[in-house]
Image (spheres, rainbow, N blue to C red):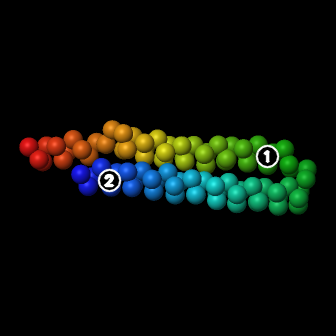
Amino acid sequence: MEVISFAALAAGLIIGLGALGACIGIGIMGSKYLEAAARQPELMGELQTKMFVLAGLIDAAFIIGTGIALWFATANPFLAQIARLVK
């Protein structure tokens, strides 16, 4: 059915774009961390702590998106609605 193929396409887009966004976000954050550490080396410890917290949040958002995409790929809730319409 078309719904299964669209769900697979959507899952791939969610995972792919989520990974791309997470990589870009962590890259930008890492470069800004290095800039800030070069300007004020005395704040390096505090900045590093904040950077790791933000890296965890960025990765958590990606992993949540991956979980939702895999949920739609394996146990698609839209298939039950289509089964009701076919009957």
Q: Nearer the viewer, residue 11 or 48?
A: 11
The disc placed on residue 75 is none
Q: For this view, does 75 lie left or right of residue 43?
A: left
Q: Could you say where residue 76 lies in the image, as x and y percent from the top left?
A: 31, 42
Amino acid, disc 1: Gln
Q: Nearer the viewer, residue 3 or 26?
A: 3
The disc placed on residue 5 is 2
Query: Does dot 2 land on a helix, a strand or a loop?
Result: helix
Q: Residue at x 64, y 43 (%)?
A: 56
Q: For this view, does 69 lie left or right of residue 46?
A: left
Q: Which residue is mark 1?
A: 48
The single residue placed furthest to the right in the displayed view is 42
Badge 2: residue crowd in 10 Å (few <14, some 14–19, many ≥20): few
Q: Residue at x 58, y 57 (%)?
A: 20
Amino acid, disc 2: Ser
Disc 1, disc 2: CB below 8 Å?
no
Query: Does dot 1 land on a helix, a strand or a loop?
Result: helix
The single residue placed furthest to the left in the displayed view is 87
Badge 1: residue crowd in 10 Å (few <14, some 14–19, many ≥20): some
CA separation in Å, label 1 and label 2: 43 Å
Q: Could you say where residue 57 lies in the image, as x and y percent from the top left?
A: 61, 45
Upstream in sequence: badge 1 or badge 2 = 2
Q: For this view, does 41 lie left or right of residue 11?
A: right
Corner quadrant of residue 49 = top right
Q: Nearer the viewer, residue 65 or 3?
A: 3
Q: For this view, does 70 lie left or right of residue 61?
A: left
